[in-house]
């Protein structure tokens, strides 16, 4: 009776053995998507300011990270632990060895990583919760000529207007710690609700990942940019459309915001608050004139039926479906005049209803 050869015994990974196979610089490069040459937005938390960097520690003779906002500093293993919310060093070693395909080590495929922890302020108390929403962080980059050509050339939006609307160019984004190099045309839409910062990644020229989003459906785009009181609010189907409208009028005369999508429902208490702040509220969703079913028109009518808002839309003959397309096809003055005409016509229709 013959016996097979004994299976080679593999060691569990540890810090020294991992660093004998890959360098600490390579580990940082793997999870950062490159080695930053200057301070960047921290991948460890929601952050739009450059407050994170890596450096060589002469004391420890290692590459360390430092988060200037929190004061935290440490080696590549602590960085991976913080990035993925891992609780033990054993799990950190296991993850790095697995991600680098270090087959010389014995790996435990059953180890799991906890979802990101989010802190919510409740008065003077702060409670921690775990969320299944993806954790998104970004690395911003300087504005470039191509950004100007896209935003200002097509939609009339300047750098100052974009930043007022919390829209920033990015070079990389991180989803649950995994780094993705962004498209040349890639932007982060930043929101903050209940003290929690969220991101919607917009890559208009990308076919695969045009949108990456961790907002919930109750989040309103450009809510924080609304005036306390105003005459007219226009609810659109996207932040881009809302930003275009905001750029055309004084905010106390006509302003704009949007829900997360045309299918999102508006909460009753939010609707009542908006009615108390604005004299008239209109819904300007897409006119999907090229589609067999005009879903934008249907969704806009549904929202108006539920809220009492007034529906307007880009007319059929314009051959454009929304404010962004309209200003791209024509110009800002033409869109401004059209919106004023649509509002006056709709208000006149409501007046006639009252008379008749």
Image: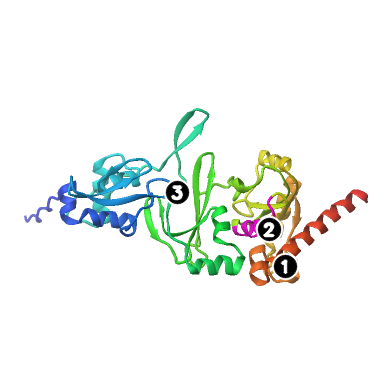
Residue 349 x, y percent position in the rendering: 85, 55
Residue 112 x, y percent position in the rendering: 33, 44
Would you name the residue on which mark 1 appears? Answer: 334
Give the structural element (helix, strand or loop) at label 2.
loop
Judged from this view, the residue extending furthest toward the right is 356
> Badges 2 and 3: C-beta atoms under 8 Å apart?
no
The residue mark sitting in front, 2 or 1, is 1
Which numbered disc, 2 or 1, marks the residue that appears first in the sequence? Answer: 2
Give the structural element (helix, strand or loop) at label 1.
helix
Q: Look at 59% across and 62% down and name the residue there.
A: 157
Q: Look at 18% across and 48% down and name the residue there.
A: 58
Which numbered disc, 1 or 3, marks the residue that appears first in the sequence? Answer: 3
Total marks placed: 3
Where residue 86 sits, quadrant-wise, is top left
What segment is highlighted magenta in the picture? 240-251
- The Cα atoms of the two marked residues, 1 and 3, are separated by 40 Å
Q: Is residue 184 shown left or right of residue 72?
A: right
Would you name the residue on which mark 2 appears? Answer: 285
Other residues around mark 3 within 10 Å, as few (<14) / some (14–19) / many (≥20): some
Residue 164 inside the magenta-drawn segment: no
Would you name the residue on which mark 3 appears? Answer: 134
- The Cα atoms of the two marked residues, 2 and 3, are separated by 28 Å
Other residues around mark 1 within 10 Å, as few (<14) / some (14–19) / many (≥20): few
Q: Where the N terminus falls, by quadrant?
A: bottom left
Residue 240 x, y percent position in the rendering: 60, 59
Q: Is residue 190 shown left or right of residue 245?
A: left
**Residue 187 appearing in the image:** yes
Residue 5 vs residue 154, the one in the foreground: 154
Q: Look at 66% across and 72% down and name the residue there.
A: 329
Residue 131 x, y percent position in the rendering: 45, 41
The residue mark sitting in front, 1 or 3, is 1
Other residues around mark 2 within 10 Å, as few (<14) / some (14–19) / many (≥20): many
């Amino acid at each position: 009776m013959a016996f097979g050869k004994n299976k080679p015994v593999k060691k569990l990974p540890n810090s020294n053995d991992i660093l004998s196979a890959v360098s600490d610089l390579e580990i940082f490069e793997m999870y950062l998507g490159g080695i930053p040459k200057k301070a960047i937005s921290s991948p460890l938390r929601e952050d739009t300011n450059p407050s994170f960097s890596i450096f060589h520690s002469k004391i420890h003779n290692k590459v360390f990270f430092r988060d200037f906002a929190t004061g935290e500093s440490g080696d590549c293993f602590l960085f991976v632990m913080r990035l993925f919310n891992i609780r033990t060093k054993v799990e950190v070693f296991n993850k790095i060895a697995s991600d680098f395909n270090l087959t010389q080590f014995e790996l435990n495929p059953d180890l799991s990583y906890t979802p990101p922890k989010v802190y919510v302020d409740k008065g003077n108390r702060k409670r921690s919760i775990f969320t299944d929403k993806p954790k998104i962080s970004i690395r911003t980059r300087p504005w470039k000529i191509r950004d100007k050509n896209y935003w200002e050339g097509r939609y009339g939006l300047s750098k100052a207007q974009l930043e007022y609307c919390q829209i920033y160019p990015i070079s990389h984004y991180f989803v649950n710690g995994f780094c993705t190099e962004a498209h040349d045309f890639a932007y982060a839409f930043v929101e903050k609700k209940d003290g929690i910062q969220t991101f919607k990644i917009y890559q208009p020229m990308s076919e695969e990942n045009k949108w990456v989003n961790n907002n919930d459906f109750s989040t309103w785009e450009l809510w924080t940019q609304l005036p306390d009181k105003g005459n007219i609010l226009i609810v659109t189907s996207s932040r881009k459309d809302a930003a275009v409208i905001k750029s055309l009028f004084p905010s106390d005369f006509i302003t704009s915001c949007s829900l997360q999508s045309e299918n999102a429902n508006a909460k009753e208490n939010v609707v009542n608050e908006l009615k108390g702040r604005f004299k008239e509220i209109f819904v300007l969703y897409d006119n999907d004139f090229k589609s067999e079913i005009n879903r934008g028109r249907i969704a806009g009518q549904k929202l108006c039926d539920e809220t009492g808002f007034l529906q307007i839309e880009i007319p059929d003959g314009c051959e454009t479906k929304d404010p962004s397309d309209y200003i791209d096809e024509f110009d800002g003055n033409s869109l401004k005049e059209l919106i004023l005409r649509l509002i006056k016509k709709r208000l006149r229709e409501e007046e006639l209803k009252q008379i008749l």
